[in-house]
Amino acid sequence: MDRTTGGAPTRPPQGVAGAVLLLGVLLAGAAPLIPLAVLVCRHEPELLPLFAVPLAVLVAAWRIARDRARDQLTDPLTGLPNRHALLLAAQEAIAEHQDQGDYSVGLILLDLDRFRSLNDTLGHAAGDRLLVHIGRRLHRVLRGGAADGRPAAPTSSCAGAAAALVAPRSVGGLAPQPASFAATTISAASPIPAPRQAPLTAPPASSPPASSLAAERRRETGELLAGLEPLAENGRRAVVARMGGDEFAVLLPGVGRPDLLERLAKALIAELAAPIRLDGLLLVLEASAGVCVYPQHADDAESLLRRADVAMGHAQRSRTGVARYDKSQDVDTPYRIGLLGDLRRALETGEVQLHYQPKVAFDGRVVGLEALLRWERPGRGRVSPDEFVGLAESSGLMPRLTDYVLEAAIGQLAAWRAHDLQVQVAVNVSPRDVLSPGFAQRVAEHLGRHQVPAHALQLEITERLLLDDSRLAADTLAQLRRQGVGMSLDDFGTGHSSLVRLRSLPVGELKIDRSFVSRMVADHHDAAVVRCSVELAHSLGLTVVAEGVEDDATWERLHSLGVDAVQGWLVSAALPADQATAWLKVHRTGPPPAERVPGLRRWTGMAELSRPGVPRQPLAPPSQAPTAPQ
C-alpha cells in the first residue's frame, strides 16, 4: 500500500524520476535477453540490431501505460483534473503535512443551478461547450486573469500571487502534467483548449456597465487571491477539477479559514454569473457552493470531499448560494444515523402518526383538514417533524415516507366517509416526490385501493417546487388535477417564485404562511403582504387559506380582507384521528370554497360560494381534545 495515497493508485512519475523508472523497466525487460545477446555478439554480430525490436516494444508499452494513467486522472471534456485526481491531490496534501498541527486544506465544491434544464433546452453539445467555458473561467480566475481571458489589472500583488497560486512545476500539453502534488494543477502556460464548435464569448467589452462590473469583480477576487499568497510556499498549488456533470471543485492546500473560503466561493460564483453569449443567446448561469476544511470538518480526504458535497446540497436547498459544512446537516453523524434507523423501523411498525388540523370558513363550516406528522421516538420523546422529514428527504427515504402518509391519510378518509363525514384532507408532499417518475400513478393507486374519490384528497406543495423544474412539476400536477386531486401552494411568501411560474402550476388554493399571519395585526408590513397575497390569489382564480390564526383580532382582519378559510390554534390544534373524528361530528362540514375563475368547475360541481358577513361562530373542540399548541 502506498503510504502517501492511502492505497489509491498513483500517477506515473515525470522528469528525472520518470527517466530513472523507464531505464529500470528497460533493464528488467531486457535482462532475459542479455545471455542471448552475448552469444549473438560473438557469433553473429550482424543480428544485434534485431534486439532493438523488443526494446522498442517495451518503450511503447511504457508510453501507453503512462498516457492511460494520465487519462484516468483527466476529465476528457474540459481537460481539468477529474474527481479521482482531486482525491489524490487532497490525500497527498494531507499526508505531506499531517504532522503539522496548524496545517489545513480548504475545499470549495461548486454546482451549476438548474443546468440540466438548460442542457435539455439547448442540447447536449451546447451544454458541453458551456462546461468547457466554465472550466476555463475558473482556471483563469485562480491564476489572476479575467474571466474572458484578458489579463487582470495588477492590483497590489494580486497578479503575482495568483500566478504563483496555480503555476505548475512543469509545463506539458493539454492535460495537467503529473508531478507529485502539482500533478493535478492547471498549467498557467497551457490554458484549457476552446471547444471545436463555435466559441463562447462574454458580452462585448464596449458595454460600460458590463465592463465596470467585470472590473469590480476582478478587483474583489484579486484582493481575495492576494490573501492566499501562503499557498505558493513549499510548492503548494491550488487544484481546479471537474467532479462530473455540472460540478467543479477548487482545492486550496494551506487555507483553513472557512470565512475566507466562503468569500472566495462567492467571488467565484459572481465570476461564473458573468453573462455568456452562445449562438445569439445571452446566458447568465447561477451556482451554489459548499465549503469544507480539513481537519476542522473532516479527518481525511474522502470525508473532505463528501462533506463539501453535504454543504453544497444545503446551499442549494436553502438558496443561500454558499454554505459551510455543518455536522447537524450531515446524514452520517452518529445521532442522525441512529435517528434514520429508528425512523425506518417506525414506518414499518406504524409508530409515525398523523394528526389532523381543521380548516374552517368564516361561516363556521369545516372545509378540510391538514394531515400533520407526529412521531414519538421510544425512550427519546417527540421528534420535530422538520428534523425527521428533512432527514428522510436527504437520505432517500422520502418516497417511502410519502407513501406511508398517503396510505394513512386516504385510509382515514375512507373511514370518515363510511361515517358520512364528507371532508377533504390535505397532505404535504416534497418537490422530490412530485418530480419522481410515476408519482401521479402512485397517488391514484392509493385512492383506488381505499375506493376514495380523488376530490377528497388535496396535495400541498411549496414554492421550492417552482424553482427546481417547473415544467416537469406542472406536467405531474396537471395529471393529478385531471384525476380530480386538489392542489394547494403552501407557505406562500417565504420562497422566491415568480408570478409567471405561479400561473403555470395547476393549483387551486394558496396558503399564506403563518410567519406573516401571526404578526399582521401588529405589523403593517406583514398586513400589506397578506392583503397583496389575497388580491393576487383571487385575481388568479385561487382560494386563500391563512395559517397560524391564534386570536380574534387576526380572525377579524383576515375576514375583512376576503380570506376564504383559516387554520390555527384559535380553531383547533392538530388532533389525533379519534379526536378529530369526535371534533368533526359536532361541527358542520362542507365543501371548500370554490375557485374564482369564471367557468372553472370545482370538484363539487357547485357554483361559487359567497362569503357570508356573519361573525365567527365559536369553534371550541370537544372536551377530550387537547388544547396544547401543535
Image: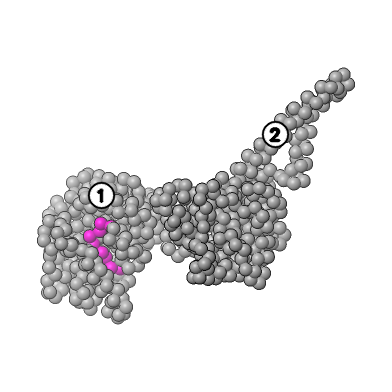
Left or right of residue 308: residue 390: left
Secondary structure of the residue carrying numbered label 1 = helix
State the residue position of label 2: 60
Does the magenta segment cover residue 508? yes
| Quarter of the image with the N terminus in it | top right
Q: Is residue 83 above or below residue 578?
A: above
Left or right of residue 58: residue 242: left
Could you say which is closer to the camera, residue 102 or residue 605?
605
Q: Which residues are magenta?
A: 505-513
Q: Callout 1, which amino acid? A: Gln
Residue 376 on image: x %, y %: 35, 58
Secondary structure of the residue carrying numbered label 2 = helix
Q: Earlier in the sequence, mark 2 or mark 1?
A: 2
Residue 388 — which label?
none
Could you say which is closer to the camera, residue 149 or residue 483?
149
Left or right of residue 551: residue 139: right
Label 2 crowd (10 A; few <14 / some 14-19 / many >=20): few
Residue at position x 79%, y 29% in the image: 31
Label 1 crowd (10 A; few <14 / some 14-19 / many >=20): some
Does the magenta segment cover residue 331? no
State the residue position of label 1: 479
Q: Callout 2, which amino acid? A: Ala
| Quarter of the image with the C terminus in it | bottom left
| Colour approach in the figure | one colour
Residue 412 on image: x %, y %: 21, 53
Q: Is residue 535 above or below residue 163?
A: below
